Amino acid sequence: MKAYSIVAFGEKLEKRDVETPNPVGREVLVKVRAAGVCHSDIHIWEGGYDLGHGRKLSLTDRGVALPRTLGHETVGEVVAMGPDADGVEIGRTYLVYPWIGCGDCASCKEEAENYCTKSRNIGVHCDGGYAEFVSVPDGRYLVDIGDLDPAQLAPFACSGVTAYSAINKLGPRIKRAPIVLIGAGGLGLMALAILKALDSKGAVIVDVNPEKRAAALEAGAIAAIDPAAPDAIAQIVAAVGGAPEGVIDLVGAPATSQLGFDLIGKGGALVMVGLYGGVATFPLALIGVKGVTIFGNLVGNLQETQQVVDLVRSGKLAPIPVTRRPLSEANEALLDLRAGKAHGRFILCPDPQH
């Protein structure tokens, strides 16, 4: 089968002919019909995350070996199963839950595999969906999508469940007043759609890109504000109707985390999602003085993934805009995403001849 893989961090993805996996035990083989190109793929391709002060979190040190085929937002058709596999059917289409743990630790036993310290994440530690086929270790990680569009459902494996899990952390705050979303990319648009599906008070979007602000307004944002404006904070507070009770930072840069912290009112919550990198600069004393809660959000669990797909199937949650591109453009799609050219999500689909 064909796969597009990292052979050296930061260098062009290489088209490789590799052996198609043969499922054993409880494994399931999925023929890829759609694979989302996610910002996390950029960090994986670059080899790590910026921790600030010249430090970097190395993926090599965290068990990521090359070559590695990217792709953790995958939808496909089950085409083969190991002799012990169950719970899925050959010929049906599923969303692949990629955040797979060891199965034995406390996190895994509490159905929080996304927090397992011995991760086997598809597209990170194991080969992912930038390929014609992907191997899934157990049918329990496949979420049936019925006759929904694979390209529109693929982003829910990461951006969808990430936004849903981040919103869940705000609890009843979303019902009391609009929240603030910093970042109007794929995650921001996904969060807007989920907030609408949950009958929340909506959201105010903050983004430096005027085209993305326009897309957010079209998607239903209450307001879309440029953080570079001299009165940005005043504009945001006015749009919310007071100091925000909840802010979700989908960028994760020093400036955005500072803005999020400055905005939060007493007893509010800041959820950190984005992984741009750097060091937070807000005063530590004010965490206590303001009584704020700061959450880190690492994707979401399998149950949350099923819940967000159920919202789509119910018709309450509309998928975000996607741009379909052939698998052979995997490298170009990754570079275009890094250059900020994606509105919504790039989705890799099988080349026309396949």
Image: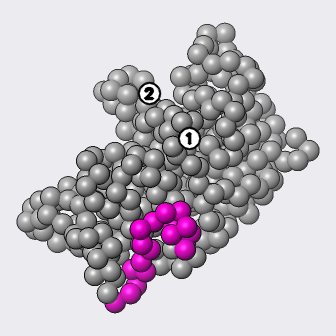
Seen in the picture, residue 197 relative to 259 is either above or below; the reply is above
Do we see residue 250 in this rendering? yes
Do callouts 2 and 1 mark residues in contact (Cβ within 8 Å)? no
Mark on residue 315? 1
What colour scheme governs how the chains and residues are painted in the rendered image of this protein? one colour
Mark 2 or mark 1: which is in front? Answer: 1
**Residue at (44%, 52%) from the top-left corner?**
196
For this view, does 55 lie left or right of residue 33?
left
Does 225 lie within the magenta span?
Answer: yes
As drawn, 31 above or below 243: above
* Range of magenta residues: 214-230
Q: Nearer the viewer, residue 158 or 164?
A: 164
User: Regarding mark 1 in the picture, which secondary structure is present there?
Assistant: loop
Q: Which residue is mark 2?
A: 102
* Residue that appears at 59% across and 54% down: 320
Q: Which mark is residue 50?
A: none
Mark closest to the chain's N terminus, 2 or 1: 2
Q: Give the amino acid type for the residue marked by disc 1 in the picture.
A: Gly
Residue at the limit of the structure toward the left, as seen here? 289
Disc 2 residue type (three-letter)? Cys
Disc 2 crowd, CA 10 A, few/some/many (<14, 14-19, 20+): some
Q: Residue at left 37%, top 38%?
A: 115
**Quarter of the rendering occupied by the C terminus:** top right
Q: Position of residue 218 (x, y in %)?
A: 55, 67
| Image quarter of residue 150 | top right
Q: Is residue 271 magenta?
A: no
Where's residue 326, x and y in %? 80, 53
